[in-house]
Image: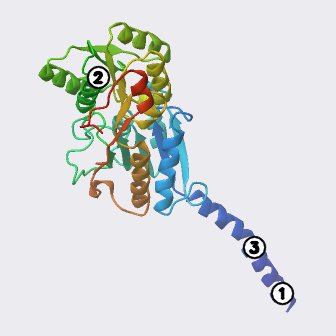
Amino acid sequence: MMMRRRQFIALVGGTALAWPLDGRAQQAAMPVIGFLSKASPDHDAGRARAFRQGLSEAGYIEGQNVAIEYRWAEEQYDRLPALAVDLVHRRVAVIVAGGNPSAPAAKAATSSVPIVFAIGTDPIEVGLVPSLSRPGGNLTGVANLNVELGPKRLEVLRELVPTAHTFALLINPTNPNAEIISRGPQAVARNLGLELVVLQASTEAEFDAIFASVAQRRGALVIGNDAFFNSRSEKLGMLALRHAVPSIHAYREFAAAGGLTSYGGSLTDLYRRAGIYTGRILKGEKPGDLPVQLATKVDLVVNLTTAKALGLTIPHSLL
């Protein structure tokens, strides 16, 4: 009887010791998402927050049933390939690639880890997927085509400022898609008989000189859709107001900060949708079977206070 009692106590003790080990095993099995960003934690905070919102809508909450490994390139695009490889070595369940430079870097790093991209241009044109409806392979995602809206921004700005002596397009020369970003506006400028000067900036220190140059020409400025510019929409808006340069950008933060107008899709909606897709993949769906989503909602925002300060009358066609 004593032997049986001791065996029972030993068995109970062994079971009790096994519980924490099982708990650690469950914790280790928590899926890990790799979040690859071309920007910095501060500048991409809103997008990361929108991504987590979409993820929660799909049933996943960071720290509870999913972990997220963040990798920030700090606008140094040449760091993205190494950061993507690092996430692959970390054996993440899904890589979320934010922005055009991040997505190609993730694709080059792996052909097996699922990738969800959130980009502002045509994913077929930049070589991410062969088809929107059936992307195949290990990539899918969401695109708002803000790069493709570049020509329309030039048309809107010309309508707002018909007396501008010249128009300028600001691009980031370090962006691998700089040629794609400038191609559409240049074609529209030729069709409309406009002079379009292409200006370049890849650091904040260059912004003042850019706006001063456009102001001196009595011109108007189209700001290209670029990760570096997008993360500094508010600063660019304030500079446009300070230099009294009629300008247009993709995101409403630019117009809210003092820029004349913005025309483009919503970054918040873009990343929220990417979060939902990531959750679906974590539940077992294959990225190649999930159609690439194209965000069709476009906002036109005009800062009427800035328009008044610049002496502009908003055409009825835009109102």
Q: Nearer the viewer, mark 3 or mark 2?
A: 2
Q: Which mark is residue 5?
A: 1
**Vertical comparison of 2 with 104: above or below:** below
Amino acid type shown at disc 3: Ala
Q: Earlier in the sequence, mark 2 or mark 1?
A: 1
Residue annotated with mark 2: 161
Question: Where residue 175 sits in the image (x, y, percent)?
Answer: 35, 24
In the picture, which quadrant includes the C terminus? top left
Residue annotated with mark 3: 16
Front residue of this view, candidates 182 and 275: 182
Q: Residue at x 40, y 16 (%)?
A: 201
Tell me if mark 2 has few (under 14), some (14-19) or many (20+) residues whose alpha carbon lies within 10 angstroms of its own.
many
**Vertical comparison of 121 with 281: above or below:** above
Of helix, strand and loop, which one carries label 1?
helix
Tell me if mark 3 has few (under 14), some (14-19) or many (20+) residues whose alpha carbon lies within 10 angstroms of its own.
few
Front residue of this view, candidates 68 and 300: 300
Amino acid type shown at disc 2: Val
Question: Where residue 103 sits in the image (x, y, percent)?
Answer: 36, 38
In the image, is 301 to the left or to the right of 193?
A: right
Q: CA distance from mark 3 to mark 2?
A: 76 Å
In the image, is 159 to the left or to the right of 94?
A: left
Q: Nearer the viewer, mark 2 or mark 1?
A: 2
Tell me if mark 1 has few (under 14), some (14-19) or many (20+) residues whose alpha carbon lies within 10 angstroms of its own.
few
Of helix, strand and loop, which one carries label 3?
helix
Q: Residue at x 25, y 35 (%)?
A: 148
Q: Are marks 3 and 1 in contact (CB under 8 Å)?
A: no
